[in-house]
């Protein structure tokens, strides 16, 4: 059983997620994230937004990736392949293998 990552916060997880997504998805500064939240009746400090992004940014990204990959696996068009690329680093050629999905 996983622990609740929001257990020490008085703010609801939905508000935290909204603040983090506003900062990550749009070209807003930490101070500018407070404006759309303030219009919705949520008064927070820019330092709180910074703390939320530092603490929950990877958590939300993992949830989004997991949900997206589950949806993609259910669709019949989801495919991936191994790609072989040669990269020069400081004059030395290196062989790089990477997994590429149908979106590239």
Image (cartoon, rainbow, N blue to C red):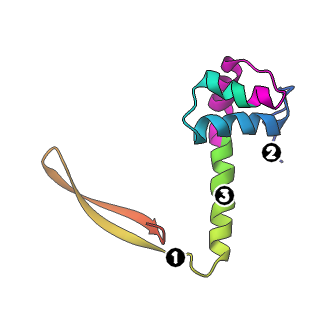
Asked if residue 100 is among those painted magenta in the image, a careful observer would answer no
Q: Is residue 18 above or below residue 41?
A: below
* Residue 21 or residue 100, whichever sits in front: 21
The secondary structure making up most of the magenta span is helix
Q: Is residue 75 above or below residue 16?
A: below
In the image: residue 82, left or right of residue 19 = left
Q: Disc 2, disc 3: CB below 8 Å?
A: no
Q: Within 10 angstroms of label 1, few (less than 14), some, or many (20 or more) residues?
A: few
Q: Nearer the viewer, mark 2 or mark 3?
A: 3
Asked if residue 55 is among those painted magenta in the image, a careful observer would answer yes
The tag on residue 66 is: 3
| Residue sitting at x 66%, y 57% | 66
Q: CA distance from mark 3 to mark 1?
A: 16 Å
Q: Position of residue 38 (x, y in %)?
A: 77, 25
The quarter of the displayed image where residue 9 is located: top right
> Which tag, 2 or 1, sits closer to the chain's start?
2
Q: Within 10 angstroms of label 3, few (less than 14), some, or many (20 or more) residues?
A: few
Q: Which residues are magenta?
A: 37-58
> Which tag, 3 or 1, sits closer to the chain's start?
3
* SS label for mark 3: helix
The tag on residue 2 is: 2
């Amino acid at each position: 059983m996983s622990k609740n990552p929001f257990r020490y916060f008085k703010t609801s997880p939905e508000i935290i997620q909204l603040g983090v997504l506003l900062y990550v998805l749009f070209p807003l500064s930490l101070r500018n994230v407070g404006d759309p939240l303030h219009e919705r009746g949520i008064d927070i400090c820019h330092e709180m937004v910074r703390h939320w992004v530092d603490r929950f940014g990877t958590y939300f990204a993992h949830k989004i990736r997991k949900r997206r990959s589950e949806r993609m696996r259910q669709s019949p068009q989801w495919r991936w392949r191994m790609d072989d690329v040669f990269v020069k680093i400081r004059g030395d050629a290196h062989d790089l293998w990477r997994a590429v999905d149908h979106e590239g």
